[in-house]
C-alpha cells in the first residue's frame, strides 16, 4: 500500500506540476505528498522529479515511470468501474455515428433494442464522412473498411458482399453481360468516396484492380442510396452492398449479374474508445449488434 500511495502522489504531482496542486486533488497536505514522492524515489534509487521554488518537472527516468504508472492507475480505475457497473442497469443517452447506408440494417432492429432497454436513449448520427469518435463525443461508431485507429477497440459484426445489378428493363434493352469484359458495352454507375474522392473499384476474381476504369461511366454518386436509386431508375449497372438491394432483388425490381466473378466482400464493425471500460449502455448495445445484425455472424 505504501508503494501505491507513493505512485498516486507521484502521478498527480506530474500532472499538476506541483505538490500543492497534487495535494488539492488528493485532499492531503503538500508536505505529505512531497514526502510520499521522496520515499518512492528512495525505494527506486532514482530521481523522478526536479524541484524548484515555483514548480516541479519530471526527469527522463520519471517520464518513463509516469507512463507506466498512469496505465496502472487507469487499469485499477477500469477494474473498479467494471465491478461498480456490473449490476447497473443500462441507461442514458448513447451517441452512435454510422454511414448513411447503415439505416438499412440498423433501423429494422432498433425497436427490439428499445424494447429491451427502455432507459437507453439512442442518438444516431448518419454521416458518410469519417467522424472522429473521441473528438466528436460519440460513444461508438459503426464502420466498414479500414479500422486502423489505435485509439478505438473494434468488434466485428458480420460480413456482406457486393453485387452488380440493374433493372430487368435495362437488361432487356442492352443485353445481359456474361463475362466481366462485356461491361465495356454497358452504362456503369460508380461510387465516389466522399472522404478521398476516389472511385470505388469493382473487384473481380479474374481481373486486375481498377478493371472498370476505362468503361463507360454514365453517373457517379458519393452516396450509396443515391447510387441505388439511379440503378432502380434504369440508368445503368450499379455495384453496391447486397443488403442495400435485398428487397429490390426479392421483388424483382433489380437482378444481379456476374455473381460468380465478383470477389469483393466487406465487413462491418462497431468501434468505441479503447481507453475505458464499456459502460452498461454501450456494453448491451455492442452485444445486441453482434447478436442481431448480419445473422449474428461475427467475422
Image: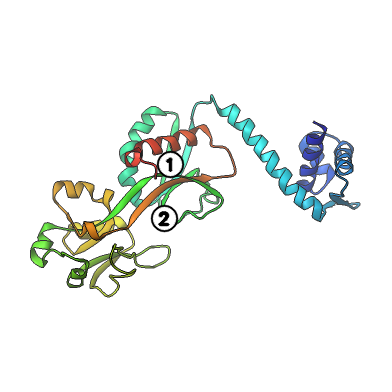
Q: Residue furthest right?
A: 53
Going by the image, does 51 lie left or right of 161?
right
User: How far across and down, in percent of the image, does residue 123 sit?
Assistant: 43, 41
| Callout 1 crowding tier (Cα within 10 Å): few <14, some 14–19, many ≥20 | few
Figure quadrant of residue 40: top right
Q: Nearer the viewer, mark 1 or mark 2?
A: 2
User: How far across and down, in percent of the image, does residue 101 sit?
Assistant: 33, 51
Does dot 2 land on a helix, a strand or a loop?
A: loop
Residue 60 vertical position relative to residue 139 in the rendered view, above or below:
below
Q: Residue furthest bottom?
A: 214
Of residue 144 and residue 260, the one placed in the foreground of this image is 260
Quadrant in which the C terminus is drawn: top left
Quadrant in which the N terminus is drawn: top right
Does dot 1 land on a helix, a strand or a loop?
A: strand
Going by the image, does 42 lie left or right of 27?
right
Figure quadrant of residue 23: top right
User: How far across and down, in percent of the image, does residue 17 sit?
Assistant: 80, 49
Residue 140 visible, this orientation? yes
Q: Residue furthest left?
A: 172
Task: For marks 1 and 2, give the CA distance.
Answer: 23 Å
Q: How many marks?
A: 2
Residue 164 visible, this orientation? no
Going by the image, does 116 lie left or right of 225?
right
| Callout 2 crowding tier (Cα within 10 Å): few <14, some 14–19, many ≥20 | few
* Residue of label 2: 145
Q: Residue at x 22, y 56 (%)?
A: 259
Q: Residue at x 37, y 63 (%)?
A: 193
* Residue of label 1: 123
Going by the image, does 74 lie left or right of 221?
right
User: How far across and down, in percent of the image, does residue 135 sit?
Assistant: 55, 51
Give whichever of discs 1 and 2 has the lower sequence position: 1
Amino acid at each position: 500500500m505504501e508503494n501505491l500511495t507513493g505512485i498516486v502522489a507521484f502521478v498527480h504531482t506530474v500532472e499538476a506540476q506541483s505538490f500543492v496542486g497534487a495535494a488539492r486533488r488528493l485532499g492531503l497536505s503538500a508536505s505529505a505528498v512531497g514526502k510520499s514522492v521522496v520515499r518512492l524515489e528512495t525505494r527506486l534509487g532514482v530521481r523522478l522529479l526536479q524541484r524548484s521554488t515555483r514548480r516541479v518537472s519530471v526527469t527522463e527516468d520519471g517520464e518513463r515511470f509516469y507512463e507506466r504508472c498512469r496505465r496502472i492507475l487507469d487499469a485499477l480505475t477500469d477494474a473498479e468501474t467494471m465491478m461498480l457497473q456490473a449490476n447497473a442497469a443500462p441507461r442514458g443517452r448513447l451517441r452512435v455515428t454510422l454511414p448513411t447506408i447503415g439505416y438499412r440494417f440498423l433501423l429494422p432492429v432498433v425497436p427490439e433494442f428499445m424494447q429491451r432497454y427502455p432507459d437507453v436513449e439512442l442518438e444516431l448520427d448518419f454521416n458518410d464522412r469519417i467522424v472522429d469518435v473521441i473528438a466528436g463525443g460519440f460513444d461508438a461508431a459503426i464502420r466498414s473498411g479500414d479500422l486502423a485507429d489505435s485509439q478505438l477497440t473494434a468488434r466485428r459484426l458480420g460480413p456482406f458482399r457486393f453485387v452488380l445489378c440493374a433493372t430487368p428493363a435495362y437488361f432487356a434493352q442492352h443485353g445481359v453481360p456474361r463475362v466481366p469484359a462485356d461491361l465495356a458495352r454497358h452504362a456503369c454507375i460508380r461510387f465516389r468516396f466522399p472522404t478521398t474522392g476516389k472511385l470505388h473499384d469493382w473487384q473481380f476474381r479474374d481481373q486486375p484492380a481498377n478493371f472498370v476504369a476505362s468503361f463507360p461511366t454514365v453517373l457517379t454518386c458519393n452516396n450509396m442510396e443515391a447510387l441505388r436509386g439511379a440503378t432502380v431508375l434504369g440508368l445503368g449497372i450499379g455495384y453496391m452492398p447486397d443488403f442495400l438491394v435485398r428487397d429490390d432483388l426479392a421483388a424483382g425490381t433489380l437482378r444481379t449479374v456476374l455473381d460468380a466473378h465478383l470477389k469483393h466482400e466487406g465487413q462491418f464493425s462497431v468501434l468505441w474508445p479503447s481507453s475505458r471500460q464499456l459502460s452498461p449502455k454501450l456494453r448491451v448495445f455492442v452485444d445486441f449488434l453482434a447478436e442481431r445484425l448480419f445473422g449474428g455472424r461475427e467475422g
